[in-house]
Amino acid sequence: MNTGSDEPGEAAVVSGRADGGDGTDGTRPDPTDSGRGLGSRAPEYVKARRALHLSWQVGVFVVGLAVVGAGIVMLPLPGPGWVVIFGGMAIWATEFVWAQLVLRWTKRKVTEAAQRALDPEVRRRNITLTVVGLVIVAALVGVYLWKFGVVMPWKIKDQ
């Protein structure tokens, strides 16, 4: 559980973009980059004491693990599984560089997917596939009703 620094009160700082672009060379800055350096966001008095900082990191890891575990349990069960998993990753990202990098990568990929989904050609293809799927389902339901009729799974007695 290393934050990337051996000195108390010091945080590792890494560029948020792989190309090093910060907008000064004509490239646009990464919209998912918060502008803060990577590393621990623990209070200064916690970072100043190595044993306290290690305890802080263990606590953050355990809480994040519990939230991620709850999200994994919610994947097959009712509940917002992926949202809870990303919430646990955000908890880890307050303290660990690897989680911050994973979260930035995930945000970038989600943003790219949203932009691709808004492309008119992709939207037209998705609408066409949805309509074809609905027509097939309607045809199958129609064939079933023609063949077997409407049969209720229970018997209703008139009283």
Image (tube, helix red, strand yellow):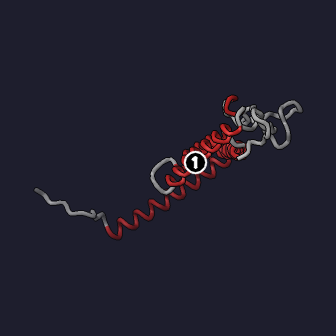
Tell me the quadrant of the picture where the C terminus can be found: bottom left
Instruction: Say which residue appears at 13% left-offset and 58% top-offset.
Output: 158
**Label 1 secondary element:** helix
Place of residue 67 in the rendered image (x, y in percent of width and height, measured from the top left):
55, 46
Q: Amino acid at mark 1?
A: Ile
Instruction: Say which residue appears at 85% left-offset and 39% top-offset.
Output: 20
Is residue 111 visible in the rendered structure shown here? Answer: no
Mark 1, residues whose alpha carbon is within 10 Å: few (<14), some, or many (≥20)?
Answer: many
Place of residue 128 in the rendered image (x, y in percent of width and height, measured from the top left):
59, 53
Asked if 124 appears above or below 14 in the picture, the reply is: below
Asked if 136 appears above or below 52 in the picture, the reply is: below
Is residue 57 visible in the rendered structure shown here? Answer: yes
Asked if 17 appears above or below 158 in the picture, the reply is: above
Place of residue 1 in the rendered image (x, y in percent of width and height, measured from the top left):
70, 47
Place of residue 103 in the rendered image (x, y in percent of width and height, measured from the top left):
68, 44
Q: Nearer the viewer, residue 3 or 152?
A: 3
Determine the image quadrant of residue 28. top right
Determine the image quadrant of residue 112. top right
Q: Nearer the viewer, residue 130 or 66?
A: 66
In this picture, residue 26 sits left or right of residue 40: right
Q: Nearer the viewer, residue 107 or 159?
A: 107
* Residue receiving disc 1: 85
